[in-house]
Amino acid sequence: MADNLISSYTQEERIKTLIYSDAADACSHVATEIASLIRTRNEAGKATVLGLATGSTPVRLYRELIRMHREEGLSFQNVITFNLDEYYGLSGDHPESYRRFMQDQLFDHVDLKLENTHVPDGLVEREDVFTSCQTYEEAIRAAGGIDIQILGIGRTGHIGFNEPGSDAQTRTRLVTLDSLTRRDAARDFLGEENVPRHAITMGVGTILDARKLYLLAWGEAKAPVLAESVEGEPTDSIPASFLQQHDDCEFCIDLAAAGHLTRVRYPWLVGPVEWTPEMVRKSVVWLAGKVEKPLLKLTDEDYAENGMADLLTEKGSAYNLNIDLFNITQHTITGWPGGKPNADDSSRPERANPFPKRSLILSPEPMDDVYCLGGTMHRLANQGHDVTVAYATSGNLAVPDPDVRRAIELIMEVGQERENQDDIGFARSVEEQLNAKGQFGEDTRDIRHVKGLIRRGEARSSARLLEIPAGQVRFLDLPFYEEGRYRRFKWGDADVSAMVNLLEELKPHQIFATGLGHDPLSVTSICFEVLRAALNECANSEWISDCRIWLYRGPGAEWDTHEIDMAVPLSPDEFEYKIRGIYQHQTQRSQSPSTLRKSGSDSWNLASQLNRSTAETYDDLGLAEYEAIEGFKLWNADKPE
Ligand code: GLP
């Protein structure tokens, strides 16, 4: 077992699954395997055939292969590649085509011969698709078959673009994309309506023919479908589950993506566990949910019948356990997220002193703050704390073009009324840049600037509602975001020093942040890594020893109840405030009414569902009944997450 593996326990699992502490470790394992095969083949004068995937998931793997090429002389001269899939209707130079992605992420940086790289042709005529797919299969066979196939997984359980319904015999073909898949790609295409409806993909059967398979997955969003693929019956409703039929397939995943595997989620069900306080809390809360009883009504039989007899022996009786857990959960609840001044704080989540506190709310993009902790922000401001909201990135990539047109028309009109040639000239120039870029072109600096300003306005307006003074709303505009695009961000020293400057200026007593467990290439996760690096740089500053870091989970998710160290209940009125705060982010409305109709929800009511469901769980556990709850977890940087 490699040192960097969290565990390699495989009971219940039908596919060999290796859980790594992070994506970097997993990628270095897979890159080493690939490199060693290439070297062996190169020495024997033989070619290596690689099956490649796109998406955020393999990006780190490709970066590692590029590094090995540059620093360790790994040669790709004798490597032949076949990509899994391509969007139908996109040419190879379209910014979102998989051909272009591969060129940018790997092919252009190593000594691969262009003629040895294969990506299905997205522009083939409809009547030629069948032949073209057969030719693709034939080319794979002619190359000797795929030695190593890299795979990611979509949230529908798809591999390549084999959506639910694809059986194990399918071959390379034209497919229709699932609506969830199209929604997941909407951000890249700046709107779901721009995402192609079809794709050409290798079939599940084509994939199963490869000699060795590695499936990679990072981040909690993949956890549910991953567990179903590994532990469930093989079924065409989760095409990745057919990988169980392959005798040399490894899943290499990070801890967040492993979160729904039985051995991670309910370890007491599969073997002996160490009953740490966290494990006890996790298991008892799970038990209450399973038997549908409040904590104080759990019986000895409930524990014994659900794999927790040894816990009972250790703690004496259900009675003791129940009371302990009730008290622990009760003490997470507080209406004073900044601590209650002049009160006994021995069993409160946040300390009473100092008061007021300097509270820093770090939001990866505008809206993440109010979406996840708008109620708490309002409370903190109302209770007299010195609250600063800092937006790490401008969020300008998420603003649709029509909103920019509206903004520049306004600038133009004001300019004309006041005869200000500078404003008129600027508005005209941005309009021309918009016209020139077309539907899929990249935004120019000016366009991104205006988009950023629009989001600033929305963020200020939301903060105003939450009673946070305009002077305490800060925009860091971290360079990694301003200079990058989705899936291609790279952060560095300039980002960290901007964060260090903010921290050293504010010297916060508490920081609210998010990003742990998210897809490592996501904006949210990168912002967290920047914060982590900045905190390391500030390690010797005095303020840091008196600073607590509260993690919020979202956007789009909430902590499980057993993970919550501070639960801030919201009254119906306060909840209303929060929702109004979210409404200020008008450019972030779901852009497509049909998506809204189909999913029945957009970010605004998703936030309310999450907060309401946390409140319901507290209620079910036998605690007080609230309208909504925002949950936070205390981060201890020294402990593994
Ligand atoms: C797309 C690709 C898949 C990929 C999936 C997950 O659908 N066709 O091959 O595995 O997205 O993408 P990501 O890695 O960005 O999560």
Image (cartoon, grey):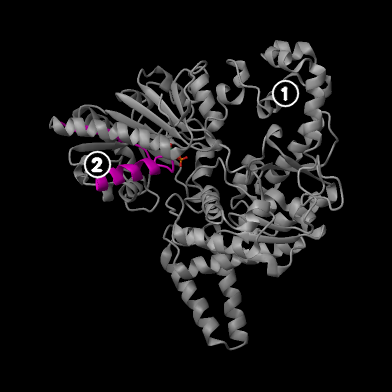
For the residue with label 1, is its CB less than 8 Å from the closest atom of ligand 1? Answer: no
Q: Is residue 57 magenta?
A: yes
For the residue with label 2, is its CB less than 8 Å from the closest atom of ligand 1? Answer: no
Q: Residue furthest bottom?
A: 419
Q: Which residue is mark 1?
A: 284
Q: In the figure, residue 347 lies in which quadrant? A: top right
**Label total for image:** 2
Q: Amino acid at mark 2?
A: Thr
* Viewer-closest of 554 and 527: 527
At a point 69% along the width and 70% down the height, the residue shown is 471
Residue 617's place in the image compared with 318, above or below, is below
Residue 242's place in the image compared with 341, above or below, is above
Q: Which residue is mark 2?
A: 117
Residue 204's place in the image compared with 307, above or below, is below
**Magenta region:** 46-71
At a point 61% along the width and 51% down the height, the residue shown is 590
| Mark 2–mark 1 distance (CA, rounded to whole Å) | 53 Å
Q: Which of labels 2 and 1 is toward the front?
A: 1
Which mark sits nearer the N-terminus, 2 or 1? Answer: 2
Judge whether residue 294 can be spotted in this image.
no
Q: Amino acid at mark 1?
A: Val
Q: Is residue 159 magenta?
A: no
* Viewer-closest of 387 and 356: 356
Judge whether residue 8 can be spotted in this image.
yes
- Quarter that holds the C terminus: top right
- Quarter that holds the N terminus: top left
Instruction: Tell whether 41 sits left or right of 277.
Output: left
Q: In the figure, residue 379 lies in which quadrant? A: bottom right
Instruction: State the SS at label 2.
Output: strand
